[in-house]
């Protein structure tokens, strides 16, 4: 039986792959998402509402001429449908690829460092195997939020998801959905709230997710009221500025 200490126990069972293949898929996605997908991959990116609020977040990988979106398994079909709305008459196929899975290791030499934060560990795409253990606890210990439960569905502005600090946005690429508000917030330094990880307490209006087994929760707090939130170096530097 494979356990958490076995090198093969690396599959993130809560993730899935959506494959984009066909005519100029990089150009297609470039005009929709927050990060630059025309250069080196993987990158962390999001599809936003026109108001600049997070709908889906994912990592974008290259597979030859295709693109692979490393996304939440529970959101994979919804993400594929949303992207299909923008496809129009382009000869592009957008579908979940169950022959591949997302793999993670806290250390080692497989894969590449997570583009959000190297301390998150290493990540790669391969056929599915035994499930990994410890990913959520490790991610939260570093103050990193992801997914619809924590980010919300059109509830949180992308920069409030710490996208600037975690390399989830390009301010030099061309237009994308939700760019106007995102760029305005950046240039005016108007990120008044942040998604943060904090010790588990009484849930309130700003609580997004609770993890009783880990003694942690994710909240959407004002910058001046971060209180007992975990403040890793990347977040401390951001709010100090």
Image (cartoon, rainbow, N blue to C red):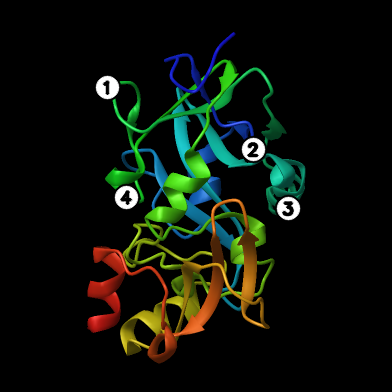
**Tag 3 residue:** 82
43 versus 166 height, above or below:
above
Q: Which residue appears at 55% of the width and 38% of the height?
A: 70
Q: What element does badge 1 sit on?
A: loop
Q: Quadrant of residue 7?
A: top left
Q: Which residue appears at 52% of the width and 45% of the height?
A: 136
Q: Nearer the viewer, mark 4 or mark 3?
A: 4
**Quadrant, the C terminus:** bottom left
**For marks 1 and 4 on the same chain, the one whose residue lies earlier in the sequence:** 1
Mark 1 touches mark 4? (CB < 8 Å):
no
Q: What element does badge 4 sit on?
A: loop
**For marks 1 and 3 on the same chain, the one whose residue lies earlier in the sequence:** 3
* Percent of width and height locating residue 234: 27, 64
Q: Is residue 214 visible?
A: yes
**Tag 1 residue:** 109
Q: What element does badge 3 sit on?
A: helix
**Tag 2 residue:** 14
* Percent of width and height locating residue 122: 35, 32
**For marks 3 and 2 on the same chain, the one whose residue lies earlier in the sequence:** 2
The disc placed on residue 223 is none
Measured in 3D between alpha carbons, the distance from the residue under mark 1 to the one under mark 4, in whole angstroms, is: 16 Å
Q: Quadrant of residue 207?
A: bottom right
**For marks 4 and 3 on the same chain, the one whose residue lies earlier in the sequence:** 3
46 versus 240 height, above or below:
above
Mark 2 touches mark 4? (CB < 8 Å):
no
Measured in 3D between alpha carbons, the distance from the residue under mark 4 to the one under mark 3, in whole angstroms, is: 27 Å
């Amino acid at each position: 039986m494979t356990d958490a200490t076995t090198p093969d126990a690396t599959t993130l069972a809560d993730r899935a792959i959506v494959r984009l293949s066909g005519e100029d898929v990089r150009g297609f996605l470039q005009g929709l998402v927050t990060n630059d997908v025309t250069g080196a991959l993987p990158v962390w990116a999001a599809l936003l509402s026109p108001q600049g609020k997070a709908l889906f977040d994912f990592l974008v990988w290259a597979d030859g001429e295709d693109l692979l979106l490393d996304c939440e398994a529970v959101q994979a079909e919804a993400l594929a449908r949303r992207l299909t709305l923008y496809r129009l008459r382009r000869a592009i196929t957008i579908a979940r690829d169950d022959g591949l899975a997302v793999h993670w290791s806290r250390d080692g030499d497989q894969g590449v460092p997570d583009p959000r934060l190297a301390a998150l560990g290493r990540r790669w795409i391969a056929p599915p195997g035994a499930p990994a253990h410890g990913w959520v606890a490790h991610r939260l210990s570093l103050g990193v939020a992801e997914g619809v439960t924590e980010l919300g569905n059109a509830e949180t502005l992308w920069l409030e998801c710490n996208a600037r600090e975690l390399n989830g946005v390009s301010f030099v690429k061309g237009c994308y959905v939700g760019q106007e508000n995102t760029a305005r917030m950046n240039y005016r330094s108007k990120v008044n709230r942040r998604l943060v990880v904090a010790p588990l307490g009484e849930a309130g209006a700003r609580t997004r997710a609770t993890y009783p087994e880990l003694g942690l929760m994710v909240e959407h707090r004002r910058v001046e009221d971060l209180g007992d939130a975990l403040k890793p170096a990347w977040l401390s530097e951001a709010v100090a500025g």
